[in-house]
Image (spheres, rainbow, N blue to C red):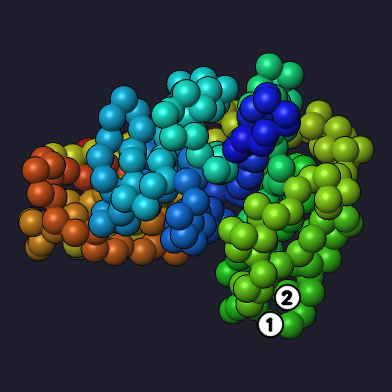
Amino acid sequence: MTENKGNTTVVSAIPIILIAGYLGSGKTTFLNRLLSEAQGQRLAILVNDFGAINIDANLIDGAVDGVIALQNGCICCSIASGLQGAIFKVLKREQRPDAIIIEASGASNPGEVLRILSDSAMQDYAALEIVVTLLDCERLPTYTPEELKLIKLQLAYSNIVFLSKSLSLSGDAQVAAEGFVSSVNPRVLLFNELSSQINLEFLLGASTRTLGQQGNSLISDGLQMQVPKAEELFRSWIYESASPTTEAEFQKLLNELPSETVRGKGFLYLKEYPDSKFVFQLVGKNAKVEPAGNWGMQMPHSKIVFIALQNSNAPTIVEAYN
């Protein structure tokens, strides 16, 4: 973005939208929705890895040097090598984006992301505008105390909270979810799945300045000392195989996973459909397998990342199937 002041061209800071939320809260679906609403706007989507966002195959144009270019003019960049470096990499592109959207890891403390974004060296070029956190209302009653500490911290840093999976809730359950959010951050703006207002245009028009800095810093500071680091709370591992698995074998694996398994995501190579690629999603005990086109020039394989609480024996179970 540029503006002219006399004979001087001033380059204004690119707005940043931070999307946060616990594992399986619906960030992928939310990001795909924002991409579909770009309508000529160039968006840079920064994610922890490309597997973290299920970009429709017909949108992908090509990948060069860690960046996926999309046919609608948006780009998707990995931040595995460092968030600040990824942002400056985006800013150096010939076509600067109109906005940057960052997906924070579901296992992460968003305060770390905010600390990086508050660096004075960056704020002249890219400035945080708003923090949107997704809350999985269906699973809210099932979270452990340790999980809730992290979720509360994510909510405390938020300007907007989107209540995902809220349509299936009873009226009392929705009121309870809204009350939970308000007890952590009473100044946050709340939206549910029926709200058409929370779209890309709305997010780009809102900001932490116009919303009055709703994030409750006192709560954030208090929770900061209580929440363990991601590596202390979770463990992750990979199920990977170049050989196809049968539907029955894979279902047997899922049946054996303990309740401490909180997330699974990746691609599946099924023996019954050797030419087809499938996307696998696991949130708690809810599993979903969806077709994702053909393998094409890619070597068929299964590769799924699982995340469980530290006290789980799930890695031992999965390793037996590798």
Residue 311 visible in the current orientation: no
Q: Secondary structure at mark 2?
A: helix
Q: Quadrant of the N terminus?
A: top right
Residue at point 37%, 39% (across, down): 50
Extreme residue in the front direction = 7
Q: Which residue is mark 1?
A: 170
Q: Which residue is mark 2?
A: 173
Q: Quadrant of the C terminus?
A: top left
Q: Nearer the viewer, residue 314 or 92?
A: 92
x%, y% of residue 91? 51, 27
Give amino acid for label 1. Ser
- Mark 1 crowdedness (10 Å alpha carbons): few <14, some 14-19, many ≥20: few
Residue at point 79%, 60% (across, down): 189
x%, y% of residue 171? 74, 83
Give amino acid for label 2. Ala
Residue 61 appears left or right of 106 = left
Q: Is residue 118 above or below residue 164?
A: above
- Marks 1/2 in contact by CB < 8 Å: the verdict is yes
Residue 297 visible in the current orientation: yes
Q: Is residue 8 above or below residue 148?
A: above
Write down the quadrant of residue 107 in the picture: top right
x%, y% of residue 139? 61, 62
Residue 29 appears left or right of 5 = left
Q: Secondary structure at mark 1?
A: loop
CA–CA distance between discs 1 and 2?
5 Å
- Mark 2 crowdedness (10 Å alpha carbons): few <14, some 14-19, many ≥20: some
